[in-house]
Amino acid sequence: MDERETRAALAMAIDSRRHKIEQRWLESVQADMRVSHVEPTDLRHGIQRYLALVVVALRSEDPGHRALHVWREVAHEHALTRVRLGFDVEQLVRELTLLRRTVVRVLHDDEVAITAESVEAVADVIDAAIAASLKSYVDARDYGARREHAEHLGFLSHELRTPLAAAALSTNMLRRMGSLPEQQERVLARIEQGLKRAQSLTEEVLLAERLEAGKVESQPADTTLGAVIDDIVDNCRQAAEIKGCGVKASYEPSLRVHIDPKLTRSVVENLLENAVKYTDRGLVELVVEDNPAELVFHVRDSCPGLSEAELRIIFEPFRRGRTQKPGTGLGLSIARRAVEAQGGRICAESGSESGCHFWFHLPKRPPP
């Protein structure tokens, strides 16, 4: 038999023994792994689908399909279950390795003709499942940790809203009571400025929490590029001029786009404000490319630059570079999540000695 016929025969043999393989696998897992606290129903979760997909993959003529697409959904569900059950990475790999061994043993015990090529075919298919499950496990575990952390921050930020609102109301009442002596006016102005800053930081943390916890969904709308970012560019240009820097923007304001205006504004605002903050002299530049399948936004500056180590962490919450300038360390994290919520990606590079380049891609979506 040729390779395709061998795989087809192997798929048929496994398909007819799926229940038996599953039962033998469960016995092996319970004997070899410390999972006595886990119910058999939970252990079986996903394994039936794995076996069904082993059969599908063996019958497929597209190796790339076997290796990538077949496993994505079931690996995701399986990984979520394992994270919930407290499995570590070693346990995840171990149970799928036992599945591979069990398939071969059952076929051998039933005196199904097994060649070295057959064993290799089973190994290849289940190795693809292991790879997909590992990625899904790491993503699910990291997402769970980020979500728990973000929810704690969100609770604290939400609790801050009430006293801040009360303080702002009190300053408004003082304003309505009439003119104040000059010294008291200056004190009140400083209080109001501090309150506005605290409220702004609270809202920033709340937005970061919602993005990290996956609670923000993209809501694209038909609009123009200018309507989304014109005022951001103007504000940043004014702030740059005060510092003695410049802001240059190159984009078509009348360009019709179908994007989430709020999320996109958040990304552009954070990137431009960051660039202006860290550029003490020189130029900040915004360029928007209108490509056939996507929009690409570029923000370049002439700041002191970032190291490779800094570039690896700047998109994570509360992680900042070596700068001593004030800030929460949330702006770039918010930008990243706001881009990803729209199905895009964000990147950064730096010459380390001088200048940074941030850019993000947003896929074009046709209007509904």
Image (cartoon, rainbow, N blue to C red):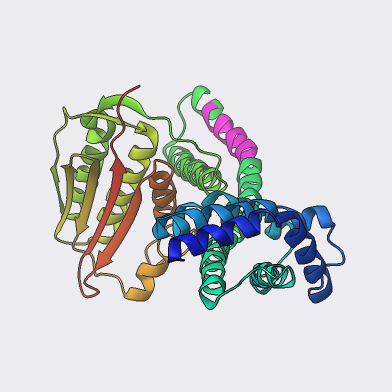
Secondary structure of the magenta portion, mostly?
helix
Q: In this view, does 336 lie above or below 303?
A: above
Residue 86 screen position, x and y as percent? 74, 63
Q: Which residue is drawn at 21% across and 75% down?
A: 353
- Residue 292 falls inside the magenta stretch: no
Image-quadrant location for residue 226: top left
Q: In this view, does 341 lie above or below 59?
A: above
Residue 33 screen position, x and y as percent? 79, 73
Is 212 on the left or on the right of 107, as rendered? left
The span shown in magenta is 161-172
Is 35 on the left or on the right of 172, as rendered? right
Residue reaching furthest right? 36
Total number of numbered labels?
Answer: 0
Residue reaching furthest front? 1
Q: In this view, does 333 lie above or below 322?
A: above
Closer-to-camera residue (199/195): 199
Image-quadrant location for residue 249: top left
Image-quadrant location for residue 310: bottom left
Is 172 on the left or on the right of 45, as rendered? left
